[in-house]
Amino acid sequence: MAGSQSASQATLETELMATYKEVSVSGFEEFDQAVKEHQGKTIFAYFSGSKDAEGKSWCPDCVEAEPVVREGLKHVTEDCVFIYCQVGDRSYWKDPNNDFRQKLKLTAVPTLLKYGTPQKLVESECLQANLLEMIFTED
């Protein structure tokens, strides 16, 4: 009897865990396309300096924040889409006229935002577990 109880308990816990789909994109056009493909869903977008062939970003803050942001994803409360977006090389990012700065009003990387809302975390905020939990759980 006790065995069946724990099995149903385990099933319940699994159902309560929300899932997310990760989409990795590079550049504004790919980001824009990913947003269009997932219209109607909750989208979290994480913007990072692009990685080189060895998988290392030119942005040290992005390197530091990425595992913390990924850990924060365990708090998502609904099925959502997590877009990991590489913004390009350093010189492109520094151009004040790049599409990310112009169209999304990004000011720094790393930035995590809940697409279509004013909610976003910028730079060192992406390292704060309590803020990540808040952005991933609030409606």
Image (cartoon, rainbow, N blue to C red):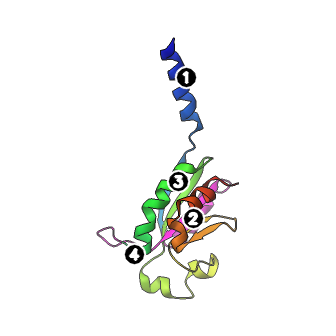
Mark 4 vs 1, N-terminal side: 1
Query: Which-is-in-front pick, marks 2 and 4?
Result: 4
Mark 3 vs 1, N-terminal side: 1
Number of other residues with Cα within 10 Å of mark 2, as a class: few under 14, some 14 to 19, many 20 or more: few
Q: Which is more toward the observer, 94 or 11?
A: 11
Count the marks: 4
Residue 93 x %, y %: 48, 82
Mark 2 vs 1, N-terminal side: 1
Residue 27: which disc? none
Looking at the image, residue 37 sits to the left or right of residue 49; the answer is right
Residue type, numbered disc 2: Gln
Report, in whole angstroms, how far the alpha carbon at label 2 lies from the one at label 4.
Answer: 27 Å
Looking at the image, residue 119 sits to the left or right of residue 17; the answer is right
Residue 38 x %, y %: 61, 56
Mark 3 vs 4, N-terminal side: 4
- Kindly state the secondary structure of the residue where label 1 is placed: helix
Residue occupied by mark 4: 60
Report, in whole angstroms, how far the alpha carbon at label 3 lies from the one at label 2.
Answer: 22 Å
Mark 3 vs 2, N-terminal side: 2
Residue occupied by mark 2: 33
Residue type, numbered disc 3: Leu
Report, in whole angstroms, how far the alpha carbon at label 2 lies from the one at label 1.
Answer: 41 Å
Residues under numbered marks 4 and 1 in contact, where contact means CB atoms less than 8 Å apart: no
Residue 8: which disc? 1
Q: Which residues are magenta?
A: 27-56
Residue 20 x %, y %: 54, 49
On screen, residue 92 above or below 138: below
Query: Does the magenta-highlighted stretch encompass residue 51?
Result: yes
Report, in whole angstroms, how far the alpha carbon at label 3 lies from the one at label 4.
Answer: 21 Å
- Kindly state the secondary structure of the residue where label 2 is placed: helix
- Residue displayed at 55% across by 22% down: 8
Residue occupied by mark 3: 73
